[in-house]
Image: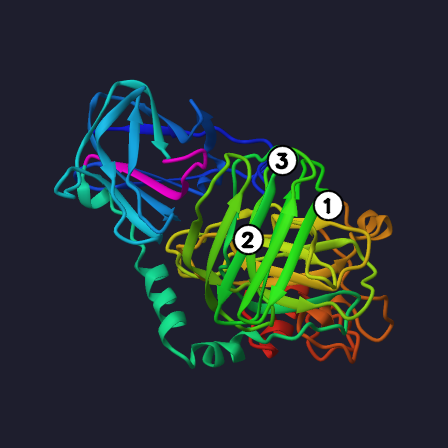
Amino acid sequence: MKHFLIFTFFMTFIMSSCDDKSMLSEQNSGISTTHSFSNVNALSSDRINNIGHTQFEVECLEEGLYYLCVLVRIPIINGSLHKYEVEINGIINENTLKPSIGGLQSLYITDKNKTPSLIQLKKGINTISIVSTSKRTIKIEQLKISSNVLDAKIDDSVYRDFLNKVKNNSNFNKEKSAAYTTSLQSEETYDYALNLIAPHTYDEYYDPWPEGIHLTLTTTCNIPHVIEVYEQDNKGNVWSWAASGTSSAFLEMVTPRWGFYNIRIKALNPGTIGTANIVYRDSEDNFTGTIEDRDVLVGGNTLPINRNLPGKNYMVTHASGRYPGSISLSLIDKNFKTIKSSHYSQIRPNPPYEFTIYTHPTMLEYDGSSSYAFVYTVNSSIPEIYADVYLGLDFSSSEVRSLFPNLPSNNSFKSGLKSRIYNCISWSVERTDYWEWPGDKGSSYYHPNLLTAFDKLYAAYGYTR
């Protein structure tokens, strides 16, 4: 059995990836140990001799032969597909990545007959680069290496099936719309939407552009949509440019400074999902042709904010399903430009991957007005996941924390105003019309043993300890 570790380089200015933790999984079989790296936005992207390289390091515990597979978004350059070389420890491998279509796909390194081929890795640190055909680095979303060809395979069937349904089923948007239209509730001091489906939408970061780059973007799409270019610095400040359209949109801008810019296409109307083609060009390398990303998903879920929210914390709290997911939360102004965006968060259910976990690492602080909250899953290989969204939260007060000293100041929130009608025990069984304390003799759940009294109360509402 051969073993290796994957080390990644983090880019400190990648939007929404700066504070993220890489997701490294290990799956054991009787043949090999497979390591998979997702959220590959965290991989180092650089230019070497003016050619784009996407780089990573592998530390092998023993020398050997391995298969390598990537989930990669392939652009159409001047109307054609291009193969991509792979450089291993400074030497270009004779075999390549050979795409058959444009768009997102799973690709092995293959020989001239398109048969998966083995790469030689030495014991210790190995440097592997996917070499682009231009200055632009290739966009890898997941990578797997294994000494067994089947274990190295990245399954893109979930994304492919979802994409085909969106493209081919004219009623798909209508069928999904009912599930997507979750209105914000405002009975508390904050707004929230529960079990919101957060579909994937196209959001790609590009190599750092210097100041003064002239960029033009054109989209064709089967739903009303917004095309946006935005850039966020390490302090959370966002610069954004946007244009909307019914079936097409056009955006032209000049970069005001050096930075990592994202290109995002999002659904204009809540509950709609579509596909788009995007063509872009920039003046940096005197490019005379076109680069096109085809059949990209256009979705996300837009929540209108119809009042001035009193709090400043905005939070996505959980995802459910059998697969890991990453969520992004953005606050949008009335012109559909991003005001502030949360960091991406890795959300992975614990084994056996059948139950919802509840966590909220995707939280941002913002003190000001906004018109929309926009939520979507980052991983295109997992085209939709569920989330709870809370907008306008205040942290718990120092008065409350003095009564509950173990309540964390940065992880507890005010859920409502003080009331003499009900207390927290009543609220826990969704009663807001009376005050309950089962330890009182006047309570219908009273018992001299307080724990038994609470058992009686919760049993009446269908709960067991």
Label 3 sits on a secondary structure element that is loop
Q: Which residue is mark 1?
A: 410
Label 1 sits on a secondary structure element that is loop
Query: Marks 1/3: CA distance?
Result: 31 Å
**Residue 217: image tag:** 2
Between discs 2 and 3, the one toward the N terminus: 2
Query: Marks 2/3: CA distance?
Result: 18 Å
> Is residue 293 or residue 430 the one in the foreground?
293
Q: Residues within 10 Å of mark 3 (few under 14, many from 20)?
A: many
Q: Amino acid at mark 1?
A: Asn
On the question of residue 376 being in view, the answer is: yes
Q: Residues within 10 Å of mark 1 (few under 14, many from 20)?
A: few
Residue 16: image x %, image y %? 59, 43
The reply to whether the C-beta atoms of the residues labelled 1 and 3 are less than 8 Å apart is: no
| Left or right: residue 8 compared with residue 361 | left
In the picture, the quarter occupied by the N terminus is top left
Q: Which residue is mark 3?
A: 259
Q: Amino acid at mark 2?
A: Leu
| Residue 134 belongs to the span the image colors magenta | yes
Which of the 4 quarters of the picture holds residue 462? Answer: bottom right
Q: Residue at x 87, y 51 (%)?
A: 399
| Left or right: residue 198 compared with residue 93 | right
Between discs 1 and 3, the one toward the N terminus: 3
| Left or right: residue 438 compared with residue 54 | right
| Residue 323 belongs to the span the image colors magenta | no
Tell me: residue 216, above or below residue 257.
below
> Is residue 118 or residue 334 the one in the foreground?
334
Q: Residues within 10 Å of mark 2 (few under 14, many from 20)?
A: many
